[in-house]
Image (tube, rainbow, N blue to C red):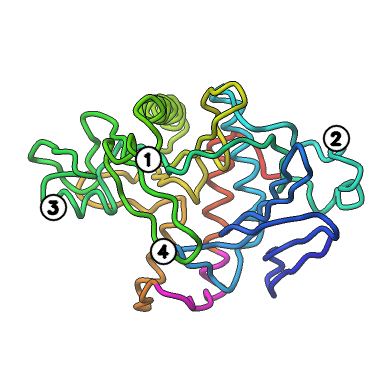
Amino acid sequence: MNMKYDKNHAMLECSVPGVPSKSGKVRDVFDLGDTLLMVVTDRISAFDVILPCGIPDKGKVLNQLSLFWLDFLGMKNHLVTADVEKYPEVLRPYADDLRGRSMLVKKVKMVEVECIARGYLTGSGWKEYQKSGTVNGQRLREGYQNASKLDDVLFTPTTKAAIGDHDEAIDFAQTAKLVGEKTAEALRDATISLYRRAADYAVQHGIIIADTKFEFGIDDDGSLILADEVLTPDSSRFWPEASYAVGRNPPSLDKQYVRDWLDSVNFNHQPPAPVLPDDVIARTREIYVKAYEELSGGKLA
């Protein structure tokens, strides 16, 4: 296995000779025939732009937290195994590189919609509400403030954009047009149900899940299947409950810290992105590890 690291020992990419692969913003995916190997690198993206540096151990946090949630939520999912000793023979020589940051998954037909659940009004939803009183076109009552808990969990899907492009918000009718009414209803119901279960658990561990993104596939029997990353600091807003207050965004245990730094240096949200300073990299690693350990109750392997 060929690995590329940055000066902070963050894994930026990997390759397996003779195995077809493709790269996403964070994951390198290898086609093993009937299954896929997903390797979570330490790459970090913000505003749909991949940064030139990584965050050490970030990939392990994302991978191991996803494994925790897949087990906790209990929904049918794409996981085959994360035990490197059970990987196909071709991968055995790379066990040490793959351990903790990879999983073997079944191939499923991915639904081309990103399914976002919002339990709190923040980010782009708050900006839209201030302008029009809506979120993803859904009319909300008056009186919400920034970071308010919503009366009901919202399903606010987006399109799946290619690397370098931006996801676009779509409403339920547009979702149904893309995937069909029945699938759109199943996506909405699963997204809201999974969010509520995770949010109830997380708040007992001192963390508010303000919003999160799920991705789903269609299994061989036509059923919905949970896939890709699940409830990680890359795909969610995690707020420490102890510092939560309506009217402002609390310091978060997720990627928002990096977004805030990029905005502080007037990054225009277009590539190339600036290199993060060492102190921002170190603090981001601390945030990711803290999120994992508080939610899972264990230490990062």
Secondary structure category for the residue under label 2:
helix
The answer to which quarter of the image holds residue 184 is: top left
Dot 3 alpha-carbon crowd within 10 angstroms: few under 14, some 14 to 19, many 20 or more: some
Q: What is the number of the mark on residue 86?
A: 2
Give the mark nearer the N terminus: 3 vs 4. 4
Instruction: Measuring from the top left, give residue 279's x and y in whole percent.
Output: 54, 71
Q: Quadrant of the C terminus?
A: top right
Give left or right: position of 103 versus 175.
right
Q: Which residues are magenta?
A: 270-282
- Disc 1 marks a residue whose amino acid type is Leu
Residue ID at (29%, 41%): 174
Identify the residue position indicated by label 1 in the image.
178
**In front: 176, or 142?**
176
Of all residues, the one furthest to the left in this rendering is 142
The kind of secondary structure the magenta stretch mainly shows is loop
Q: What is the number of the mark on residue 47?
A: 4
- Disc 3 marks a residue whose amino acid type is Gln
Identify the residue position indicated by label 3 in the image.
130
Dot 1 alpha-carbon crowd within 10 angstroms: few under 14, some 14 to 19, many 20 or more: some
Could you tell me if the residues under marks 2 and 3 are in contact, i.e. CB atoms within 8 Å?
A: no
Tell me how far mark 3 sits from mark 4, CA to CA.
Answer: 21 Å
Give the mark nearer the N terminus: 4 vs 1. 4
- Disc 2 marks a residue whose amino acid type is Lys
Secondary structure category for the residue under label 3:
helix
Tell me how far mark 4 sits from mark 1, CA to CA.
Answer: 24 Å
Instruction: Measuring from the top left, give residue 131's x and y in whole percent.
Output: 12, 54
Give left or right: position of 122 versus 25.
left
Residue ID at (52%, 74%): 276
